[in-house]
Image (cartoon, rainbow, N blue to C red):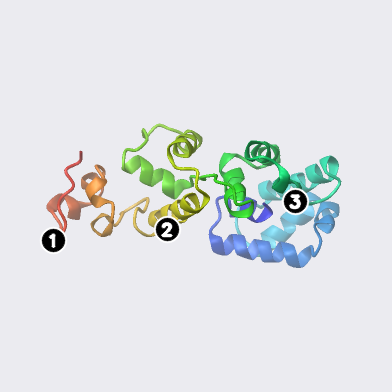
Amino acid sequence: MLRVILSQQNTNAVAQRQWEALTFTYPRWEAALLDGPEGIEATLKAAGGGLARVKAAYLHGILAHLEETRGELSLRFLRDLPDDEARAALEALPGVGLKTASLVLLFDLIRPALPVDGNIERTLKRLEFVPPNWSAERTERWFDRVVSREWALRAALHVAGVRHGRHTCLPRNPRCPACPLLDLCPSAPLLSPEVTAGTPGRPVCSGG
């Protein structure tokens, strides 16, 4: 959970650096709780990356919440809860919203959640699967309803969607001619001059 909080608006490299700094500084999470948000913030700042104060407050808030409500700094109790109760318990934690809870459910608790990050959201909107004005939360709730509730399928779909957004369906200058979804994408002619002009070996996307 704490590692997922660090990944919010951070690159994987920065989040990993901060995680290593935290676990080195605090071999037990009780030490982080005692050090307070200021101490956690200093540790995060030393490792680099932004939003150190906000994330330190979230991390300390999660630890304090668990200490107060569970008497231990552990989320093991979630393993015994039904999916909806586990999600509610996660979203009650400071800094934890729909996507963060879904990531923990999918990869830590092996539940059939389906987190939608910015890469997946961008791809879905360019494919016009969802309206462009939908929020990330509304998009995730729609995606959750239409995709089979099979854990392996959802895990693979999430990983593939993130990879596709990072390497092909980029925010700027997307690599449309190399996209395996080109024939399905009505946005490609608007985003890539190569597609509009026609790319050898690939049909031009008609735009719907």
Q: Amino acid at mark 3?
A: Arg
Looking at the image, is 39 positioned above or below residue 137? Answer: below
Q: Amino acid at mark 2?
A: Arg
| C-alpha span from label 2 to label 1 | 25 Å
| C-alpha span from label 1 to label 3 | 54 Å
- Seen in the image, is 92 located left or right of residue 142? right
Q: Amino acid at mark 1?
A: Pro
SS at mark 2 in the image = helix
**Could you tell which of marks 2 and 3 lies nearer the N-terminus?**
3
Mark 1 lies on residue: 200
The one nearer the camera, 64 or 74, is: 74
The residue located at (29%, 57%) in the rendering is 175
Mark 3 lies on residue: 76
Mark 2 lies on residue: 163
How far across and down, in percent of the image, does residue 6 sit? Answer: 63, 54
Tally of numbered discs: 3
The residue located at (42%, 58%) in the rendering is 163
How far across and down, in percent of the image, does residue 165 sit? Answer: 39, 53
Structural crowding at the residue carrying mark 3, measured as other residues with C-alpha within 10 Å and reported as few (<14), some (14–19) or many (≥20): few
The one nearer the camera, 84 or 141, is: 84
**Could you tell which of marks 2 and 1 lies nearer the N-terminus?**
2
How far across and down, in percent of the image, does residue 180 sit? Answer: 28, 56
